[in-house]
Amino acid sequence: MKKKNLIAVIVTGVLVGFAGVFLMIKGNPGNMGFCIACFLRDIAGALKLHTAPVVQYARPEVIGIIFGSFLISLITREFRARGGSSPLTRFFLGFMVMIGALVFLGCPLRMVLRMAAGDLNAWIALIGFVIGVFIGTLFLRNGFSLGRTYAKNPLEGAIVPVLQIPLFIMLLVASPLLAFSEKGPGSMHANIWLALILSLAVGVIGQRSRICMAGGFRDVFMIKEFHLFWGNIAILVVALVYNLINSSFKLSIAGQPIAHDEWLWNILGMLIVGLGSVLLGGCPMRQLILAGTGNTDSGIAVLGLVAGAAFAHNFGLASGGVSIVDGVRTGGTTANGRIAAIVCIVVMLIIGFAYSKKAAKSK
Amino acid sequence: MEYVATFHTHYGALSFLRRIRDLGDEKAMMIPAPRKLSVSCGSAVCFTLDFDEDAMVDDDTEGVYRVEGDDYIELFANH
């Protein structure tokens, strides 16, 4: 049984690693074949929740992951509408995870895809992610809990997955109700059907395997269990090999696509993402998959991620990819983003302590 | 006899493990929740002490199962 689970996680990692490079080759932005944070941010832009003109596109990858998880959980009778575990706190944790991701410029999945493409900034950010996950496991060991979930009306669990249908139709017909970037990363995308089919597959197999970027490290720290971690390794190895074959591997700090080289803020940005993901019980990709299975708490976390993205762009918190034109450097973190990152760390620590019960301390 | 308990929260798993160890099962340990039992990525506890609902479970305990090969026989459910 354990071996079967391990194979499922590795197969998921292989698929995600392959899709992460393949979708980039087919038109998605550089080292961004898959990025849950960036794609939720693009969806927030498409819905005009923010007005940054270069990051507006209703990404079918997000739609596919949620809907794939929804379909497979209906087929296997694992769809269960559940929720009620501190939803507002989860909303703000999602909100802050997105701010951390946009200071770094990527979710844990994109961090690994960037690492696999030779982006040394992402390797530096990994330090922050691991520290964040480790701090999260310290809170778990000290009894951190957002409370248990309860069964809900099935309709409530179906809201987030079913909402993907009108969003996809609007994307397909290029509805004027949506915003579409004409330049920048939002204008770069793979064929809609190709992206949808691949991400449906990721949603299906991700639901079966329970792959989770933060869960992989968390289980290593908590219970010295490596099976989810091997999924992360599979993504890295497959994407690395694919990048080498495709000549899209470039080992450097400077000149990486949609990235900046401010190491401290890369570390702190991913520390926020790692810590927030453990407190939420899963990384942004895992939140999409859980939302597809009827988990309304994850649905709320996804809405928090979307709101965080809108806020980050409306208030100048999001970093920009560094570019140098005529000797002038643009992009990097912003002052607002750096302040927000510190605030997010402090607030997450407060949440961590506030929801911890020392009585649960294990031997 | 081997048992597996699943939980609504990590806190539930940690406090269950502590109770089981206090009851004398020093070899009880946390494991990833078996795929068959839960769609969450949460932890489970594997133990061998005879199951005693009154002494072991609380509201955070989702289920307790007896392991028989690849099958899990449900002994307690709190969904």
Image (cartoon, coloured by chain):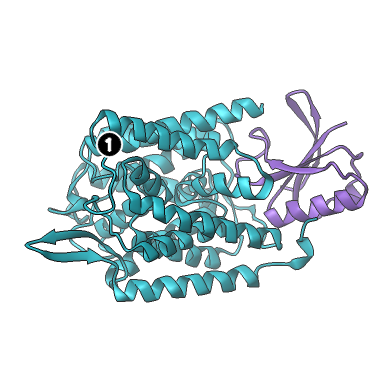
Viewer-proximal residue, A193 or A234? A234
Q: Give the letter of the chain under mark 1.
A: A
Palette colour of chain A: cyan
Residue drawn where x is 52% and y is 54% of the image = A130
* For residue A229, side relative to residue B50 (left or right): left
Quarter residue A337 falls in: bottom left
Residue A79 higher or lower than A76, as above or below: below
Q: Residue furthest top?
A: B69
* For residue B48, side relative to residue A206 (left or right): right
Q: How many marks?
A: 1
Quarter residue A259 falls in: bottom left
List x then y, in percent, for residue A303: 43, 59
Which chain: purple? B
Look at label 1 and name its amino acid.
Leu
Residue B49 higher or lower than B54, as above or below: above
Q: Residues within 10 Å of mark 1 (few under 14, many from 20)?
A: many
Residue drawn where x is 32% and y is 51% of the image = A39
List x then y, in percent, for residue A98: 40, 61
List x then y, in percent, for residue A167: 31, 48
Viewer-proximal residue, B41 or A115? A115
Please tell me whether mark 1 sits on a helix, a strand or a loop: helix
Residue drawn where x is 66% and y is 26% of the image = A1
List x then y, in percent, for residue B21: 87, 49
* For residue A47, side relative to residue A79 (left or right): left
